[in-house]
């Protein structure tokens, strides 16, 4: 008898005990102590001889994928290449092979698993290109390929409506390169519409043989920290393309994903400006664009993202004032550091250039009446200084009578000062002479 939930994660063994159902007493413990040196010796005729170590045998794939909805071998020490033998009519809905030492390419036969919803191949040594050949997996909700050796671009030419239900895609820590195609974001229907009409649910599958449920779980990077989603909410959405070699501009179509919660494009080589369309992502809770080559100013539309709880724009080439709003000034200075031309709160080392501007409906900045008033203050002061200087100096230059009237009291004041100084000098000389005579008489 086969369990519909073949889950053997976190064993860290060279061999695995036999999962007999049911067992109790001493036989159970002795079975749990059994180990084998290689999984290749597994006999697929029954679970009594089921052992896990080494490579994944073909017979396991043939048996489990046709009878079970879930195959979870995560966090073991499996080696070798991924099997190329996923049969037609594959019944898998979840395949978890993450956290092993598997090599080779993503098998093209995975396209036979048309009903798969969760595909987690992260943290292995898988190489090759982006698996465009899996475009027919219309039920796919979670795709995790992080921390492998995948490379090349992610363009899938001639493919439309690819993975419309996809809610989590994690390509971080690979060697992907090239530009991000705009249609890649415009095809993410689940991130545009969301399952907001109903209450939040979990990705879970009923196991008819045992009458209970299996809940999927994955590890994601959220708000700069690694966290495990023990139950994947159907309303949780995330895109993580960090730590790759992507370049070019960030497509404006990313602003169409109105129900996106996590966006991480950090540690790439993106250029251009931050799309103002990001202001449309009203559900966005975490945005990380750090360590790129983004330039220009921060769009004022980001100031309207009141749901945002994590922001990192550090180490880019951003310039100008940080827009003021109910949210941006609440983030720490580290969210903006490494941008030499950026200034304004919460940065402490900044030079005030003008009063802050307010965002308009089209995403541009408009100047307030106070800005014009400040300009008039400088203009008025300059005019007043010029007029006052002219009123005094011009008559002195061109009017003899004005000069006489002006210099007569000045001359009198100068004479008084000179007379007073001369009188003090005479008094000082007289006191010096008297003192000298006294010293002579004393001797």
Image: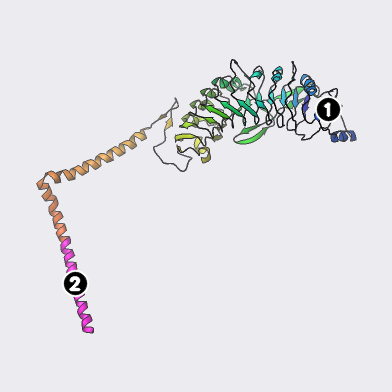
422 drawn magenta: yes
Q: Is residue 439 above or below residue 135?
A: below
- Which range of residues does the magenta coloring cover? 417-443
Residue extending farthest to the right is 26
Q: Is residue 158 above or below residue 260?
A: above
Left or right of residue 29: residue 231: left
Q: Position of residue 336 (x, y in %)?
A: 50, 37
Q: Position of residue 157 (x, y in %)?
A: 58, 17
Which residue lies under the disc numbered 1? 41
Q: Quadrant of the C terminus?
A: bottom left
Contact between labelled residues 2 and 1, with CB atoms less than 8 Å apart: no
18 drawn magenta: no
What label sits on residue 362 in the rendered view?
A: none
Q: Around disc 1, counting alpha carbons within 10 Å, would you say few (fewer than 14), some (14 to 19), or many (20 or more)?
A: some
Q: Is residue 222 above or below residue 70?
A: below
Which residue lies under the disc numbered 2? 429
Residue extending farthest to the left is 401
**Residue at disc 1, secondary structure:** helix
């Amino acid at each position: 008898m086969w369990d519909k939930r073949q889950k053997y994660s976190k064993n860290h063994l060279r061999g695995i005990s036999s999962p007999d159902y049911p067992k109790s007493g001493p036989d159970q413990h002795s079975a749990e102590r059994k180990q084998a040196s290689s999984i290749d010796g597994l006999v697929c005729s029954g679970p009594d001889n089921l052992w896990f170590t080494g490579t994944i045998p073909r017979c396991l794939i043939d048996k489990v994928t046709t009878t079970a909805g879930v195959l979870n071998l995560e966090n073991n020490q499996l080696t070798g290449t991924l099997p190329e033998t996923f049969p037609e009519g594959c019944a898998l809905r979840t395949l978890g092979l993450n956290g092993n030492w598997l090599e080779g390419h993503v098998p093209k036969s995975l396209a036979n698993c048309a009903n798969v919803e969760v595909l987690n191949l992260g943290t292995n040594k898988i190489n090759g290109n982006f698996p465009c050949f899996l475009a027919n997996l219309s039920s796919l909700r979670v795709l995790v390929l992080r921390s492998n050796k995948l490379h090349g671009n992610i363009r899938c030419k001639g493919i439309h409506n690819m993975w419309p239900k996809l809610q989590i895609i994690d390509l971080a820590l690979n060697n992907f390169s090239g530009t991000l195609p705009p249609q890649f974001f415009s095809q993410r229907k689940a991130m545009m519409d969301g399952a907001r009409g109903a209450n939040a649910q979990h990705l879970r599958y009923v196991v008819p043989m045992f009458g209970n449920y299996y809940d999927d779980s994955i590890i994601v990077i959220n708000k700069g920290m690694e966290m495990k989603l023990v139950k994947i909410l159907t309303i949780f959405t995330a895109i993580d393309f960090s730590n790759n070699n992507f370049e070019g501009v960030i497509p404006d179509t990313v602003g169409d994903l109105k129900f996106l919660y996590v966006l991480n494009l950090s540690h790439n080589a993106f250029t251009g400006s931050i799309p103002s369309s990001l202001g449309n992502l009203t559900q966005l809770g975490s945005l990380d664009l750090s360590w790129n080559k983004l330039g220009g100013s921060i769009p004022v539309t980001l100031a309207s993202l009141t749901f945002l709880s994590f922001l990192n724009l550090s180490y880019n080439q951003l310039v100008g004032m940080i827009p003021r709003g109910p949210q941006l000034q609440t983030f720490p200075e580290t969210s903006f550091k490494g941008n030499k031309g950026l200034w304004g709160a919460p940065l402490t080392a900044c030079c005030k250039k003008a009063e802050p501007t307010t965002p308009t409906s089209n995403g541009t900045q408009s100047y307030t009446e106070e800005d014009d008033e400040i300009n008039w203050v400088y203009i008025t002061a300059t005019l007043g200084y010029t007029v006052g200087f002219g009123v005094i100096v011009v008559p002195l230059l061109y009017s003899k009578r004005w000069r006489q009237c002006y210099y007569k009291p000045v001359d009198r004041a100068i004479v008084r000062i000179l007379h007073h100084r001369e009188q003090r000098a005479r008094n000082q000389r007289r006191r010096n002479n008297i003192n000298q005579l006294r010293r002579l008489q004393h001797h």
